[in-house]
Image: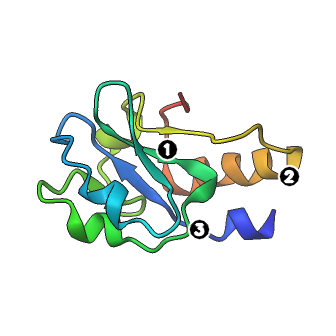
């Protein structure tokens, strides 16, 4: 759990995302994908705080979790799990949500 608990991660405002894919290409951890609507989506457990996605987004649709607006943190659809979480990973996830004020559920 300590591994997953230490990362801040990013928040994606899919209403701003223009589906360019720059973030997907920039992430060295393959922690981003384009969803069924072509919008960027975070794969929660893969994000390792590289933040290159934040730097390359031409419309600033991606923010560090600590810097994202409450509105963005509440929108549905911007993150998912790439696998089933273990109980320890689930605990890390719940702590992350609390720490960063994430109110949206995963897809």
Pointer 1 residue: 102
Establish if 73 lies above or below 32: above
Quarter location, residue 4: bottom right
The Cα atoms of the two marked residues, 1 and 3, are separated by 14 Å
The residue tagged with tag 1: helix, strand or loop?
Answer: loop
Pointer 3 residue: 7
Q: Residue at x 15, y 41 (%)?
A: 18
The Cα atoms of the two marked residues, 2 and 3, are separated by 15 Å
The residue tagged with tag 2: helix, strand or loop?
Answer: helix
| Nearest to N terminus: mark 1 or mark 3 | 3
Pointer 2 residue: 88
Color encoding of the figure: rainbow
Q: Residue at x 39, y 32 (%)?
A: 35
Q: Quadrant of the N terminus?
A: bottom right
* Residue 95 horizontal/vertical position (percent): 68, 53
Q: Residues within 10 Å of mark 3 (few under 14, many from 20)?
A: some
Residue at the limit of the structure toward the left, as seen here: 59
Establish if 100 lies above or below 15: below
* Residue 31 horizontal/vertical position (percent): 50, 55
Q: Nearer the viewer, mark 2 or mark 1?
A: 2
* Residue 82 horizontal/vertical position (percent): 64, 42
Q: Residues within 10 Å of mark 2 (few under 14, many from 20)?
A: few
Quarter location, residue 47: bottom right
Q: Residues within 10 Å of mark 1 (few under 14, many from 20)?
A: many
The residue tagged with tag 3: helix, strand or loop?
Answer: loop
Establish if 101 lies above or below 7: above
Q: Residue at x 28, y 42 (%)?
A: 13
């Amino acid at each position: 759990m300590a591994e997953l608990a230490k990362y801040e991660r990013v928040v994606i405002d899919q209403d701003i995302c223009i589906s360019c894919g720059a973030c997907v290409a920039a992430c060295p951890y393959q922690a981003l994908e384009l969803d069924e609507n072509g919008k960027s989506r975070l794969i929660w457990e893969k994000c390792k705080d590289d933040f290159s996605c934040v730097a390359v987004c031409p419309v600033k649709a991606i923010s560090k979790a600590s810097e994202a607006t409450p509105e963005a943190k509440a929108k549905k659809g911007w993150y998912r799990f790439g696998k089933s979480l273990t109980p320890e990973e689930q605990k890390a996830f719940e702590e992350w949500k609390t720490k960063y004020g994430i109110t949206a559920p995963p897809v």
